[in-house]
Each structure stands twice: as C-alpha cells, then as structure tokens.
Image (cartoon, rainbow, N blue to C red):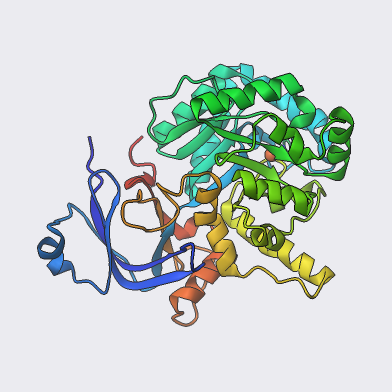
Amino acid sequence: KKKNDNTSVGTFVHSTPQTPLQILEDALLGVDTRGKIAFIDKGGELQDLSQTFGFSPSKVIQLEDHEFFMPGMVDTHIHASQYSYAGTALDMPLLQWLNTYTFPVESRFKDLQFAHNVYTQVVKRTLRNGTTTACYFATIHTDSSLLLGRIAHDFGQRALVGKVCMDRNSSYPLVKPVVTPRFAPSCSEALLTQLGAIAKNNNLHIQSHISENTEEVKLVKELFPDSESYTDVYHKSNLLTEKTVMAHGCHLSDKELVLFRETGTSLSHCPNSNFSLCSGVLNVRNVLNHKVKCGLGTDVAGGYSSSMLDAVRKALDASKVLTIQNPEHNTLTFEEVFRLATLGGSQALSLDDHTGNFEVGKDFDALRVNVAAPGGPIDLIQSDRPKNLLEKFLNLGDDRNIMEVFVAGRKVVPFTDL
Ligand code: GUN
Ligand code: FE
C-alpha cells in the first residue's frame, strides 16, 4: 500500500473555533504514514525536521509564492442522484419541482448501470471542485446507495451516504451511512420514529430537510397537527441529535433554533437552492447567534452548481440581500463564510475530530491552490498577500486553481490512482 507521508512548506490558511481565518506563512506541515497531521510549525526549517521531530518525509511539497494550502471543503448537503439534471428544471417551487422532476429521475436508480454512471460523475466532479467531504442523499434503492459508497471509497472521498441499510456498517474507512428520512411530508410518523430508533441504537448520523419553503411548512402543519412546530415533528421521533444535519431551515422560528442548539442539531445552508427554487433567504447571522452549528451545502440539483465555491459566493450574496433589506443586519464576512465551508461543515457533520482544519492529529484533507494557475480564471496584477489571494480564489477561482486535493493524506486529485 502506498505511503501517504509528506511535508509541505509554504502558506497555510484555515479556520479555528476562535478565529475565522488564520494564516500561517513559511510554515511546515508534516503528514504521517496514516495521513494524519503530525506537526505544523510556523517558520520551521526543513533541515531541522529529523532532529526536532524524528521525521524524514518521503516527499517534500514546496509551495510557490501565489500558492497556499487550505482545508478541503465540506459539502453538508448534496443529492448525488440529482446530478444528472443539475443546471436545469428550476422553474417551479419545491413541492411541484419534486413531483415533476425529482421523483421520476430518482426512480431510475433501480438501474445499477445508470446509478454507476451518475454517481461516478458526481464524485469525480465534486472532488475536482475541492469537496473532500460530501454528505450525500442517494435514493430509496439499497443497491445503488451502496454503490455510491463504494465509488466514493474508490476515488478516496470522505462521505456520508444515505439511504442507509440498517446497521450494516461499511468497511470503507472514510465512508459512513447516514439515516435519511427524506422530509416530514414524505414520511409517516411511524417511519420517522423507527428511523430515530435505528439511528439511536447504532449511533448513526441523521440527515433530512426542514422548513425550506412556506408551502412545505404549511403542509407539515396539516400532516402533523399534534406537533408544535416542524422542528418538533423530528424532535418527537428522536431525530434531533448531535449527529443530525438538517438542510435549509429558511423559515425556522427562533424558538426552533433554540431546540436545534439544545439537541446539538446542525443546519446546512444551501443558498443556491434557496434562490433557485425561490424558497427563502436563511439568516445565517441569526443561526450563528443562536450558537447552532452551521455548514454550507450545494443541494444539487435544487442548487444548480456542484461547486462549494459557488456555495461560498451565494452564501455571501444571501447575507448581502438581508443587509439590503435591513441595513442593521450584520453581513457575513468572507472569512466567516470560508469557515462555514471548511471547519463549520465538519462541525455540522460531527466530523471535526477528524477533519476541517490543520490541527495536529487530524487527517490531512487539503487543497493545494494556485491562484495564478496558467490558463486559469484569475490574473494576478500585483503580488497579493495571502488574505487577498484567498479572497480572490473564493470569489473568482474554480477547479483550474485546485492543483491537488488530499483526503487523509492521500492525493485523490488528479486521479492518478485509478
Ligand atoms: N425536500 C424534500 N426532498 C427534497 C429534495 O430532493 N431537494 C430539496 N431541495 N428539498 C427537498
Ligand atoms: Fe436537498
């Protein structure tokens, strides 16, 4: 088996719980043979490595001036099964959209050949776009859901995959099952309760949708007249846990956000989808003020882009829309949104012990970014500081700027291993 150890020299940018953007220049970062971060040393000298750390890497990565490493991005909500029609079919509100476009396409995933084709494309595309961790919705089909897990494993992506088959844990170290009730309107109370019990008995992740559009909220009120709120529907079935991520939440009340906070449930903010289906504008500032864990999601194909960079930009746009509507609103900064896309996402998926930033002991999930990549979308006129380089990459960059992608220390882009 290939060894993954290496030492990188150059600029590292990442987030911590205390600061949304920490910049480490002229730093050394060592990755051990298990792919874990062994040390990170600001201003260290390569020659001292073996003395100081008893470490002689099998590979040294020397970054150029306009390059930096950032943590891999975490897509907290993406429908792998909807990738085939991404970029189309955005002319209806949610409930009509589901019936007209989504359900017919998803029914095709009983065909494993079709599933194999779509799932291979989406895993490759998201990896190239810098998504090192993805929290996927598959379909109701067990075999093709298992196939998605295998494809993520084969390409080396860290993933949560639902639909889930009970407690049959996969043997893929980076891929975990996630209990996936689609959303309350398509689940009976009995199904929700059973899924809550399965998750609890097997300590599994949970994902679903909540409070995406107002018509849906109204429907849930009618379908679950005994529940105090949409959030209460899931809470009653023990589906709100430390390992639960709920997508959207545009129309949650403050009281519901308190319940999110109390149960440790997190939110996946999917701004492209919220704009595209005219669902609503989530107030992320209010979510953060309630100390609810929050990450970003592409929500393909309600969101038309599979790129987390697009999610970053749309999250900034959504926050600015709120400021236009109310100048008192405290707009999110690009540093804060950078954190949502990386550390925030890993916290939202309860994976922050393993990934999300460059802390010793965590897995090395990282993007090698070249802001001035030849043939890329960015022209560097002057030599910018790392903070400006990161801002330019977030606003203007694309996969041409992502030279290499590492997951758990293994280089997964370019696809050399397959
Ligand atoms: N709510 C229930 N199912 C879906 C889905 O597939 N996409 C989105 N955006 N919302 C949903
Ligand atoms: Fe969704």
Q: Position of residue 354 (x, y in %)?
A: 40, 46
Position of the N terminus, as image quadrant, is: top left
Number of residue marks: 0
Occupied quadrant, residue 114:
top right
Q: Is residue 21 above or below residue 125?
A: below
Q: Name above or below for residue 268 compared with residue 368.
A: above
Q: Quadrant of ligand 1?
A: top right
x and y, in percent, of residue 94 in the image: 81, 39
The quarter of the rendered structure image containing the C terminus is top left
Between 163 and 272, the one lying in front of the other is 163
Picture residue at 47% right of the left edge, 19% below the top: 168
Residue visible at 48% across and 57% down in the picture? 400
Question: Residue at 59% of width from left, 62% of height from top?
Answer: 337
Question: Which one is in front, 124 or 97?
Answer: 97
Q: Residue furthest bottom?
A: 382
With 385 as the anchor, is 140 left or right in this view? right
- Of 292 and 89, nearer the camera is 292
Q: Does the image show residue 304? A: no
| Position in image of residue 86 (x %, y %) | 68, 40
The answer to whether residue 128 is left or right of residue 276 is left
Which residue appears at 81% of the width and 34% of the height? 227
Q: Above or below — where is 53 with respect to 64?
A: above
Q: Is residue 39 left or right of residue 243?
A: left
Q: In the visual, does 203 lie left or right of 137?
A: left
Image position, residue 325 (x, y; %):
84, 69
Name the residue furthest left: 51
Residue 288 visible in the snapshot:
yes
